[in-house]
Amino acid sequence: MNVQLNVNGESRSATCAGWESLLTVLRDELDLLGSKNACEQGECGSCSVILDGDLVCSCLVMIGDCEGSDVTTIEGMGSADRLHRVQEAMVASGGVQCGFCTPGFVVAASHLLADNPHPDRDEIREALSGNVCRCTGYGAILRALESLAGDTP
Ligand code: FES
Ligand code: FES
């Protein structure tokens, strides 16, 4: 099938089997390698993207269900020259970790703050509960988001 998506504000198309995952298409067809495949079972959050406004594990979404959808990946959150405010806060707090877990944390955190600009610690923990760092380095990430929760967005 040919699927048409709006990815990070750009119209993109891909030719793929309808049963393939959104994650596979993002990485293998659209060359967007920021979303990672660490478990492919919906357990780790490293493949997190925003799909039509919802935070999803892209490894669990069939591309056949995505025709015409809006997708925001980590590549759409910021750039090396202009970091997203979540990325800036994570750098400042020492919360930047490995390349597998960090993209998913940034996507999940930015989704939370867009919906709830002033979350408390429990709300932050709940919002990040689908994201796993195998090294258990959660403290600095929580501090980064708490610093943003007190900001005016
Ligand atoms: S790779 Fe999708 S949740 Fe782990
Ligand atoms: S630093 Fe990425 S999994 Fe722990």
Image (spheres, rainbow, N blue to C red):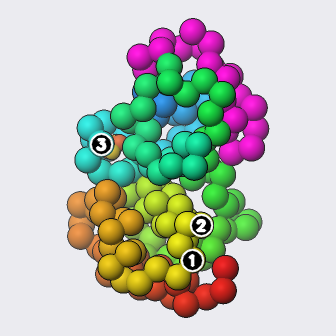
For label 2, count other residues whose C-alpha is less than 10 Å away and answer few (under 14), some (14-19) or many (20+). few
Q: Amino acid at mark 2?
A: Ala
Residue 80 against residue 26 in the figure, above or below: below
Can residue 24 be seen at all in this image of the molecule? no
What residue is disc 2 on?
114
Residue 119 position in % (x across, y down): 46, 80
Q: Main secondary structure of the magenta part?
A: strand
What residue is disc 3 on?
42
Is disc 3's CB within 8 Å of ligand 1?
yes
Can residue 20 be seen at all in this image of the molecule? yes
Q: Nearer the viewer, residue 20 or 126?
A: 126
Residue 73 against residue 31 in the figure, above or below: below
Is disc 2's CB within 8 Å of ligand 1?
no
Residue 9 occupies which quadrant of the picture? top right
Residue 33 position in % (x across, y down): 53, 41
Inter-mark Cα distance, 2 to 3? 23 Å
For label 1, count other residues whose C-alpha is less than 10 Å away and answer few (under 14), some (14-19) or many (20+). some
Q: Residue at the location (74% across, 66% down)?
A: 81
Q: Nearer the viewer, residue 94 or 5?
A: 5
Residue 21 occupies which quadrant of the picture? top left
Inter-mark Cα distance, 1 to 3? 26 Å
From which residue to which does the magenta span run? 1-20
Residue 1 position in % (x across, y down): 57, 9
Q: Residue at the location (37% across, 40% down)?
A: 37
Inter-mark Cα distance, 2 to 1? 6 Å
Question: Is disc 1 placed on a helix, strand or loop?
Answer: loop
What residue is disc 1 on?
117
In this image, 137 relative to 51: left or right?
left
Asked if marks 2 and 1 touch (Cβ < 8 Å), the reply is yes
